[in-house]
Amino acid sequence: MSSISANRSALRDFLESESAGGMLLIFAAIMAIVVANSSFGESYAHLIHATTGPTLSDKLGPMTVHLWINDGLMAIFFLLVGLEIKREFVDGRLASRDRRRLPFIAAAAGMAVPAIIYMAFAGGTEGLAKGWAIPAATDIAFAMGVLALLGKRAPTSLKLFLVTVAIVDDMGAVAIIALFYTAKINLLALGAAAALLGVMIACNRTGVRSLALYMLLFALLWYAMLLSGVHATIAGVLAATAIPLDRTPGAPDSASSPLHRLEHALHPWVAFAIVPVFGFANAGVDVRGLGVDQIFAPLPLGIAAGLFFGKQIGIFGSVWLSVKLGIAGKLRGATWLQIYAVAMLCGIGFTMSLFIGGLAFPDTPALIDEAKIGVLMGSLAAALTGFAVLRFAPLHPEHDAIEAESDREIAADGDVSDTSEARA
């Protein structure tokens, strides 16, 4: 057997599972809000923060359901993120410098402008500057779920652009978490983590292919990172860099490639279990009794404005300038209005924004709830507006022909040219 599937494209599987997982995430978030504001609200809060033990870190104390989800399950989410980043850079749509250019520019602008807008609204309020990174993230699953509702009206080039921007965006979010949301460092534990990562890299270099061994070392690396003060989820991204990858350009994934096998094995669990569980555990906020002053306080307003306005200004503005200045080509088969709508959808910051919100204000539950309100407001506005614009935007004159060609290329896992207008 030379491939994961002789008949299925890995890229098609990825796009479809992200879309379906995104819709499940939307449902989980809605359920969390409904439950948190119902007669079961108290039981919901008790369940999420129930102590389960043991005490893995003196700083964290006894483990709770919430800690297991945010520090444990999300490490697996970050492992998958790391695998996707490595595959795209080594053997995917970000493997060449030309194809990295537009996603990097768009992602950088799409992180910087929301942070600037947030600081304009909330930076002057004491203690809130720490939340500057909350609106900088894009939730790929949620956004792909919205695109899935549009069917063939959403050009393939836009889906691929959204995926690549979100992957680069994830890299930025990981760097932000490691650099700005790290507690006091335990040098001994950090040294142990570095040694374990070194062992994993040595295993890769010497030809070790056993995923069981890599997963054991990943578990140990996660514990060392948990003790070090650097957020434990970073272990997932670090471990992914050491997983061996067999290059398969223009072909389905190799069944003998450890990275491909692990990515295929993890993706359904992450998309259909871990991310929805995270959404359910973190989206629930009791809004009963909240007044207009609380909803439009500097923190939620700054986050919502950063996500809704910052993302569309930063991403669409940088894409338009890049095309006009000749830095990159226009997305194939997409109109400017459709590109603008996808820039809006990038304002759905749900999963990563909620995660960073918890890191920014770890000892202030009231601020975490305010951050949740801001994330929900901004993400909902971005989702509804982006969907509406895409739903009613005129299609590219050669939409059907270009989509048929893209389908054939994706089915063969070929090189889908998603940043050139020349063939349109």
Image (spheres, rainbow, N blue to C red):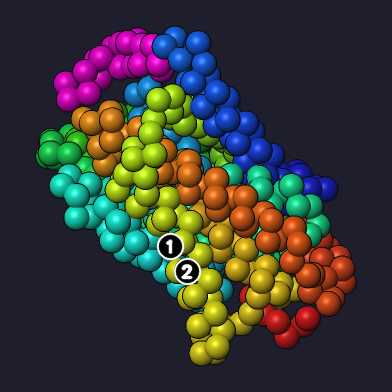
Q: Amino acid at mark 2?
A: Ile
Is 16 one of the magenta-colored residues? no
Label 1 near label 2: C-beta < 8 Å?
A: yes
> Observer-nearest residue: 221 or 66?
66
Could you tell whether 237 is left or right of 16 in the image?
left
> Which residue range is magenta in the image?
44-65
Q: Quadrant of the C terminus?
A: bottom right
Q: Quadrant of the N terminus?
A: top right
At x 58%, y 44%, the residue is 142
At x 19%, y 55%, the residue is 124
Decide if residue 58 is in sight here: yes
- Mark 2, residue position: 313
Is 57 one of the magenta-colored residues? yes
Mark linked to residue 310? 1
Where residue 26 appears, as percent x and y from the top left, is 60, 36
Secondary structure beneath dot 1 equals helix
Where residue 73 appears, as percent x and y from the top left, is 44, 29
At x 49%, y 75%, the residue is 317
Vertical placement of residue 320 versus 146, above or below:
below
